[in-house]
């Protein structure tokens, strides 16, 4: 076990290692799968790498495991440079998207395979396989053929092949629940957490499913277009997304983001969206060079107000209500022209962004009924507003915290 | 109890297939059955002889010899072409222009008509003008496939290997290409050696195509006719007279339709039986 460090990793599938900066024929720029990734994986942590398909997360995983040699940058295991070492010489294990098992072998032989390849004594192999089979609940099927296991057992078995090697620096998971039945997914996920508690391996889990990532990991790394957008605890990502994409990607539905003008006056800061005036937290928290920014707020943080004329309330013309059982998602347009009569009918829903921004509001099931065509009056609590410039966070939450490093 | 109403309309749907199979298989086969139990003396004179021809054919020492020769040939073909085909598929390129080139080169022998293959090898093996034959003689070997039984036999075998190993190789290559990269990656992470990768990943994943390759190559080689007919004509002596050649001589050469029909049926049943056995065994092996 060791800390894993990625130093200024960049990767392009188009160019060989070290040739990233050389001029290319035809002058075309190489397509990057990863660009300038700096990451440090603490020993024993449970991490999730989250991002949409094609964001480079599987490439990053391949670079950690040694299946891919990065075009630029170093991979360090416990301070030792392993960038050029092949997978077999690194202490790493990986569980793939679909279960990889050796068809002709029994469960026992599958578990013993990585140890046999490394020339361990039979007695030692027996001891380790027995121990791991015990904690993975595979003891009863040890002598069965591996092909007869169910899909989730096969995935457990694939994990077991990593666990038997007691010296692995990390176990990598590449969307391991893709082929598992939905009702077994959470069982397997719980199993993973148990395993993590018991063995304290570093676990790095790649997924595009935010639920998987947020429930599995102590720390989540969100990626897009080959870059790390944010790294933090699930709570950080939820409360203070460092990038509008993180806000959009994490949470269901994602964060509402709309352009606004921020002005600072003595003693107060305000954001203007069209004619709407939204108070922000104390001016010290807003950037000095205020101007055109983006305002982000989570659907669950928008407060729905009762009664018609509350001060500073914002009108939302409701265009759809989805019932999700425990909560409802209200879709509507935020805008100046629609706020006339609080409960009256809307004549037309303007489509232009200047007149009304489509926003989503998550309200509790026991809140008063909302119907399409109603106008809701809402308030954006200043403590939950995040401000962005060019998609990157500039301020928010009012806690004055630094962005997690 | 559920009451099922019989719906006989379904029979109509299988009618086209039944007619097709009747004309392509059942009617010709039944004609052969008809011949096999009669002695046909002339166009209008025939005598019913029961199973006489079957008895006679089964006791024919020439046929026994041809049968053993055939078995030896078919198993030699399998023993050489399968490992060779797997080996070729393993070293075939995986990407780039070399892929299409190797595919075309491999497919060439498969595109050549049987009788042309025979002619090519007949000339290739000649000791006076043939490149292969002349080269062997120059090397000091006493090679002459028109005189020596072993030489003739080996020539036919090598020709079959040249002709059909590409088929096995192409089948295996497609099988190898179908293995997801994750298997190789997992094996690399598990520290598997090259041999282990072959033994525990590639070979098991090739099982299905190998079953097909074995079936195809066994049936084809068991029915081999054209190439030895062109190259050696079954000689010298009877050394390259395989079953179908024996049959042709019986039916067309001597016009013994009765014995030939009886033998055809035996031949057919034998191939059917072998294929069934192969298929069953392979399936068993697969399921463990």
Image (tube, rainbow, N blue to C red):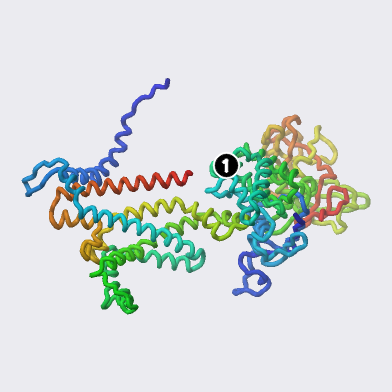
Compared across the picture, whether A389 is left or right of B129 comes to: right
The relative height of residue B173 versus residue B18 in the rendered view (above or below) is below
Q: How many marks?
A: 1
Compared across the picture, whether B24 is left or right of A377 comes to: left
Whether residue A206 appears in this view of the structure is: no
Compared across the picture, whether B183 is left or right of B75 comes to: right
Residue A184, by quadrant, is top right
Q: Residue at x 56, y 50 (%)?
A: A102
The relative height of residue A255 versus residue B153 in the rendered view (above or below) is above
Rendered-image quadrant of the N terminus of chain B:
top left
The relative height of residue A201 versus residue B229 in the rendered view (above or below) is above
Q: Residue furthest bottom?
A: B138
Residue nearest the viewer, comparing A180 with A287: A180
Q: Residue furthest top?
A: B1
Q: Residue at x 22, y 66 (%)?
A: B236
Residue B10, by quadrant, is top left
Q: Chain of mark 1?
A: A
Whether residue B3 appears in this view of the structure is: yes
Residue nearest the viewer, comparing A243 with A44: A44
Q: Position of residue B225 (x, y in %)?
A: 25, 59
Q: Position of residue B80 (x, y in %)?
A: 39, 61
- Report which residue position mark 1 lands on: A143
Compared across the picture, whether A156 is left or right of B287 comes to: right
Secondary structure beneath label 1? loop
Say few, some or many: other residues with alpha carbon within 10 Å of mark 1 (under 14 / 14 to 19 / 20 or more). Answer: few
Q: Position of residue B235 (x, y in %)?
A: 22, 64
Q: Position of residue B129 (x, y in %)?
A: 27, 77
């Amino acid at each position: 076990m060791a800390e894993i460090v990625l130093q200024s990793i960049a990767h392009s599938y188009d160019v060989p290692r070290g040739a990233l900066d050389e001029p290319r024929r035809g002058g075309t720029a190489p397509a990057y799968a990863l660009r300038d990734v700096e990451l440090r994986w603490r020993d024993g942590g449970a991490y999730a790498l989250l991002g949409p398909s094609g964001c480079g997360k599987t490439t990053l995983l391949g670079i950690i495991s040694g299946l891919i040699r990065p075009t630029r940058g170093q991979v360090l295991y416990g301070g030792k440079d392993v960038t050029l070492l092949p997978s077999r010489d690194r202490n790493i294990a990986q569980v793939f998207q679909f279960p990889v098992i050796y068809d002709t072998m029994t469960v026992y032989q599958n578990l013993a395979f990585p140890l046999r390849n490394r020339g361990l004594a039979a007695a030692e192999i027996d001891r380790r396989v027995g121990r791991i089979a015990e904690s993975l609940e595979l003891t009863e099927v040890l002598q069965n053929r591996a092909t007869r296991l169910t899909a989730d057992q096969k995935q457990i078995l694939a994990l077991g092949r990593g666990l038997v090697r007691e010296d692995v620096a990390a176990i990598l998971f590449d969307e391991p629940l893709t082929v598992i039945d939905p009702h077994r997914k959470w069982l397997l996920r719980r199993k993973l957490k148990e395993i993590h508690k018991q063995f304290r391996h570093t676990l790095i889990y790649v997924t595009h499913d935010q639920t998987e990532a947020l429930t599995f990991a102590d720390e989540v790394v969100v990626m897009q277009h080959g870059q790390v957008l944010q790294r933090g605890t699930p709570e950080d990502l939820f409360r203070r997304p460092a990038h509008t994409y993180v806000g959009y990607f994490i949470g269901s539905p994602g964060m509402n983001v709309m352009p606004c003008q921020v002005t600072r006056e003595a003693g107060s800061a305000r954001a203007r969206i069209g004619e709407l005036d939204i108070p922000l937290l104390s001016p010290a928290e807003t950037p000095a060079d205020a101007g055109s920014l983006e305002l982000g707020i989570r659907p669950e943080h928008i407060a729905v107000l009762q009664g018609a004329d509350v001060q500073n309330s914002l009108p939302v013309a409701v265009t759809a209500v989805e019932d999700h059982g425990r909560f409802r998602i209200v879709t509507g347009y935020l805008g100046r022209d629609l706020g006339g009569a609080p409960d009256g009918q809307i004549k037309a829903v303007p489509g232009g962004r200047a007149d009304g921004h489509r926003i989503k509001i998550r309200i509790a099931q026991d809140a008063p009924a909302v119907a399409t065509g109603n106008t809701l009056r809402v308030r954006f609590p200043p403590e939950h507003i995040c401000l962005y410039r060019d998609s990157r966070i500039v301020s928010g939450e009012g806690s004055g915290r630094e962005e997690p490093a | 109890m559920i009451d099922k109403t019989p719906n006989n309309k379904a029979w109509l749907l299988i009618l086209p297939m039944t007619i097709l199979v009747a004309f392509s298989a059942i009617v010709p086969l039944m004609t052969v059955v008809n011949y096999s139990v009669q002695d046909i003396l002339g166009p209008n004179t025939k005598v019913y002889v029961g199973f006489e021809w079957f008895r006679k054919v089964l006791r024919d020492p020439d046929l026994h010899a041809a049968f053993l020769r055939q078995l030896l040939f078919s198993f030699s073909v399998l023993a050489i072409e399968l490992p060779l085909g797997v080996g070729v598929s393993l070293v075939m390129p995986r990407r780039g222009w070399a892929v299409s080139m190797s595919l075309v080169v491999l497919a060439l022998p498969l595109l050549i008509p049987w009788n042309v293959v025979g002619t090519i090898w007949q000339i290739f093996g000649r000791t006076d003008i043939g490149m292969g034959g002349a080269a062997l003689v120059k090397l000091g070997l006493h090679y002459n496939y028109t005189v020596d039984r072993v030489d003739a036999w080996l020539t036919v075998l090598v020709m079959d290997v040249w002709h059909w190993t590409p088929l096995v190789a192409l089948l295996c290559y497609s099988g190898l290409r179908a293995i997801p990269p994750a298997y190789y990656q997992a094996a690399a992470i598990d520290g598997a050696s090259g041999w282990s990768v072959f033994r525990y990943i590639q070979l098991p994943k090739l099982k299905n195509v190998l079953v097909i390759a074995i079936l195809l190559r066994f049936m084809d080689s068991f029915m081999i006719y054209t190439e030895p007919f062109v190259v050696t004509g079954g000689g010298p002596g009877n050394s390259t007279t395989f079953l179908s050649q024996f049959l042709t001589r019986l039916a067309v050469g001597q016009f013994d339709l009765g014995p030939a029909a009886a033998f055809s049926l035996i031949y057919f049943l034998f191939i059917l039986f072998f294929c069934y056995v192969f298929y069953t065994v392979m399936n068993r092996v697969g399921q463990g």
